[in-house]
């Protein structure tokens, strides 16, 4: 029985398997090196970067919910300069592609960051987080307005030759419309979904649990929504999709692939088990071997609906 | 490291408070007082996140089989406050738990010449026991324990057996002095103000009060913080605390799980 071929390719990024680690859940990779072999996963996506260092929100920033968790970290990060100085050197020590997730407060900031990231050879691709407010336009979240998203993606596209993945927000009326806007602006791939906006309340204190009041819901609770959106978007656009949302097991990952995803991201699962991404890869391989499926690529969009 | 520990014992030491002993691999013995573990309560998604617990004690026991060597173990103290801890309280000898640890920074034992003063509040005092075991070898160690009522005062006998002079305060006076543990601490320091090192572990209001005492009296002081955590490894940034110079344009957030949980009190911003 030959080993199944687990490799996939997205916009020129060659990955040895379709399992990537999601931004914000894996630091910059090094933090997890003692718990799993970083060479066993398909790609690492770094914590979201901004031009200047960002403090993030006051605490409490996290709260567990039924089958999930809310986070309102507030995009705390070291800023692009410290990223280049302190985090990039580690990427040279691993073969696994490292993808830089980034965001901006204005379209110009997105462009500037994309330009800077373009010049870093250790960064294999960029993932654009458009789930942030445009401070120039009354704080409307880029990812909820097709024209704003299109503007950002166009600018990023012009600023870098690296593969551009756009991460979609689910907090929209029509995710397909957003997908079209980004694909039309020449994104190379789409990753979805980012977190769903939610809230938790402390009955005794009669206050919201999070200092920010609302936060992003992640974990198993969001999987059905994520799966539906991946399926809808995959039917609507021609570019590759990366599925994200409550993936805890190989079964979950394979379901996303059936729905149309070429690859998946594992996020919250890494908090339960730091080696989750690695385990999911292994179990996907076992599944394919048992079923006599020669390549994981055969799963992509194979849903019979 | 990540390991599957076996529950050796799980004993209720005071109503709602438990002491659990768990096995660990040999390398776990490198754990330092002040470090903690992240416990996966069960192999399911509800409850989702691991729970952090300070290492109360660490040791080894001889196994039944003469040539099998010794087995490393560690103890944690926990209070049943919610779903996760309620599940833990029903575990028995032989059950298994997935553990991440040892995590975080430990206490700095400091110079042997200074007198050591430990200040603990409720179940937060757990790491102080492991610390006391080390410190008593070098000199005088005093412990001030506080809690709401006598049921919240834990393990006094264990500390006394080590040779630690223990002073108790409860808010309602049902055990020891009535009032805050920091008030009792102040009175003792007043009588004897020579150079000491404070080690405090407990709820934030208690830590603030101890930090204020240390500042005023110019004493060395290390505090161990508690925080809600998701990853426990410095990746998610959920458990941060403000560093001394933290400001809107000069962010300086520290992860309690990685840069702490033990901090020199001067490193933090006390508001």
Image (cartoon, coloured by chain):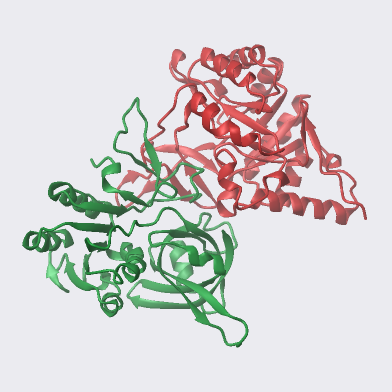
Chain colours: A red, B green
Instruction: Give the percent coordinates (x, y) of residue B156.
Output: 26, 75
Residue lying furthest left: B191
Give the residue at x 38% y 52%. Answer: B261
Q: Is residue B155 above or below residue A303?
A: below
Q: Is residue A282 above or below residue A222?
A: below
Give the residue at x 54% y 24%. Answer: A103
Q: Nearer the viewer, residue B139 or B262?
A: B139
Instruction: Give the percent coordinates (x, y) of residue A15.
Output: 76, 36
**Quarter that holds the N terminus of chain A:** bottom right
Instruction: Give the percent coordinates (x, y) of residue B161.
Output: 28, 80
Q: Is residue A128 above or below residue A264?
A: above
Horizontally, is B163 left or right of A26 in the view?
A: left
Horizontally, is B69 left or right of B188 in the view?
A: right
Q: Nearer the viewer, residue B104 or B78?
A: B104
Q: Nearer the viewer, residue A229 or A48?
A: A48
Q: Nearer the viewer, residue A279 or B136?
A: B136
Q: Is residue B97 visible?
A: no
Instruction: Give the percent coordinates (x, y) of residue A8.
Output: 80, 36
Q: Is residue A22 above or below residue B48?
A: above
Q: Is residue A211 visible?
A: yes
Horizontally, is B49 left or right of A175 in the view?
A: left
State how many labels appear. Answer: 0
**Quarter that holds the C terminus of chain A:** top right
């Amino acid at each position: 029985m030959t080993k199944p071929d687990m490799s996939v390719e997205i916009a020129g990024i060659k990955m040895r398997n379709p399992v990537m680690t999601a931004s914000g859940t894996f630091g910059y990779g090094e933090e997890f090196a003692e718990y799993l072999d970083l060479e066993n996963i398909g790609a690492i996506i770094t914590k979201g970067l901004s031009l200047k260092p960002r403090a993030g929100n006051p605490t409490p920033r996290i709260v567990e919910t039924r089958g999930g968790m809310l986070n309102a970290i507030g995009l705390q990060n070291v800023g692009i300069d410290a990223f280049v100085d302190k985090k990039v050197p580690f990427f040279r020590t691993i073969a696994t592609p490292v993808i830089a997730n980034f965001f901006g407060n204005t379209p110009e900031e997105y462009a500037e960051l994309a330009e800077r990231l373009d010049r870093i050879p250790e960064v294999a691709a960029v993932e654009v987080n458009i789930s942030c407010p445009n401070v120039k336009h009354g704080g409307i979240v880029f990812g909820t307005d097709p024209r704003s998203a299109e503007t950002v993606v166009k600018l990023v596209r012009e600023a870098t030759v690296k593969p551009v993945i756009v991460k979609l927000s689910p907090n929209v009326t029509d995710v397909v419309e957003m997908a079209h806007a980004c694909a039309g602006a020449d994104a190379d791939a789409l990753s979805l979904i980012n977190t769903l906006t939610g809230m938790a309340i402390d009955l005794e204190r009669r206050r919201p649990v999070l200092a920010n009041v609302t936060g992003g819901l992640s974990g198993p609770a969001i999987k059905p929504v994520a799966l539906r959106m991946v399926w809808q978007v995959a039917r609507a656009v021609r570019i590759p999709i990366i599925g994200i949302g409550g993936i805890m097991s190989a079964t979950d990952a394979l379901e996303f692939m059936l729905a149309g995803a070429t690859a998946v991201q594992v996020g919250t699962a890494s908090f339960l088990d730091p080696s989750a991404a690695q385990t999911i890869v292994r179990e996907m391989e076992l599944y394919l071997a048992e079923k006599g499926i020669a390549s994981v690529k055969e799963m992509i969009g194979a849903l019979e609906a | 490291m990540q390991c599957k520990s076996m529950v050796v014992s799980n004993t209720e030491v005071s109503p709602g408070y438990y002491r659990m002993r768990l096995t660990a691999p040999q390398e776990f013995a490198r754990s330092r007082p002040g470090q903690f573990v992240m416990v996966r309560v069960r192999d399911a998604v509800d409850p989702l996140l691991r729970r952090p617990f300070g290492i109360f004690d660490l040791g080894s026991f001889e196994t039944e089989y003469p040539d099998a060597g010794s087995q490393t173990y560690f103890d944690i103290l926990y209070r049943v406050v919610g779903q996760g801890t309620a599940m833990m309280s029903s575990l028995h000898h032989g059950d298994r738990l997935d553990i991440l640890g040892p995590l975080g920074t430990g206490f700095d034992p400091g110079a042997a010449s200074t007198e050591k003063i430990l200040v603990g509040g409720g179940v937060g005092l757990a790491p102080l026991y492991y610390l006391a075991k080390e410190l008593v070898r070098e000199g005088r160690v005093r412990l001030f324990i506080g809690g709401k009522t006598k049921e919240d005062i834990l393990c006094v006998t264990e500390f006394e057996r080590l040779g630690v002079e223990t002073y108790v305060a409860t808010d309602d006076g049902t055990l020891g002095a009535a009032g805050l543990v920091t008030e009792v601490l102040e009175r003792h320091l007043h009588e004897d103000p020579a150079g000491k090192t404070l080690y405090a572990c407990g709820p934030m209001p208690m830590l603030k009060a101890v930090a204020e005492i240390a500042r005023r009296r110019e004493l060395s002081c290390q505090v161990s913080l508690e925080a809600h955590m998701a990853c426990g490894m410095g990746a998610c940034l959920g458990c941060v605390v403000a560093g001394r110079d933290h400001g809107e344009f000069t962010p300086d957030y520290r992860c309690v799980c990685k840069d702490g949980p033990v901090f020199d009190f001067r490193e933090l911003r006390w508001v």
